[in-house]
Image (cartoon, rainbow, N blue to C red):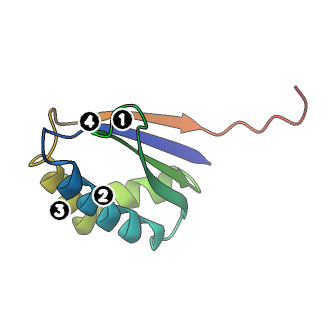
Amino acid sequence: MLMTFAKFQARSGAVSSLLNLAQALVDYSRAETGCLEYGCYQDILDANTLLLVGRWTGQEALEMHYESARFRELVHRFGEYVVEAPPSVSLYSVVEVDHL
C-alpha cells in the first residue's frame, strides 16, 4: 500500500478556486481503481495551504492515476492558482506495525 502527500500554497485570493479544483480531483481520484482513500485538507493556521492525501493499493494503481488524462488536466489547472508549481509531493510505503 502507498500513500501520497501533495502540499500546495494558494496565491493570494485564489484559495476558493483552488479548493474547487481540489474537490474535482478528490472526486475523480476516489472513483479510480486502486484508490483506497483520497482527501483534501486545509491548514488551520494558514488557510492558503492545502494538503492532498491519497492511499493506493500499490504502485500500478498510482501510476495509472498519474497517467490518466483527467488527472493531468486537473493538475495542469492547479498552476493557475498556486504560488509554486510543481507542489511538494511525497510518496510513502505503508508499514504495518502491530506493537510499538
User: Quick one: SS at disc 4?
Assistant: loop
Label 2 amino acid? Ala
Q: Amino acid at mark 4?
A: Pro
Q: Indicate which disc, 3 or 1, sits on the residue closer to the N terminus.
A: 3
* Residue 55 - label: none
Alpha carbon separation for disc pair 4 and 2: 13 Å
Reading the chain from its start, which is encountered first: label 4 or label 2?
2
Residue at left 37%, top 40%? Answer: 6
Residue extending farthest to the right is: 99
Q: Position of residue 92 (x, y in %)?
A: 54, 35
The earlier-in-sequence mark between 2 and 3 is 2
Residue 89 - label: 1
Residue at image position (30%, 57%) is: 22
Marks 1/2 in contact by CB < 8 Å: the verdict is no
Circle 3 residue = 73
Q: Nearer the viewer, mark 1 or mark 2?
A: 2
Q: Is residue 54 above or below residue 93?
A: below
Mark 2 secondary-structure assignment: helix
Mark 2 — residue? 22
Q: Is residue 62 left or right of residue 87?
A: right
Residue 34 position, x and y percent, is 53, 64
Q: Is residue 38 left or right of residue 20?
A: right
Outermost residue, bottom side = 31
- Pick whichever, 14 or 22, lies toward us: 14
Q: Earlier in the sequence, mark 3 or mark 4?
A: 3
Name the residue at 44% across, 40% down: 5
Report, in whole angstroms, how far the alpha carbon at label 3 lies from the one at label 1: 18 Å
Foreground mark, 2 or 3? Answer: 2
Label 4: how many residues lie within 10 Å, few (<14), some (14-19) or many (20+)?
A: some
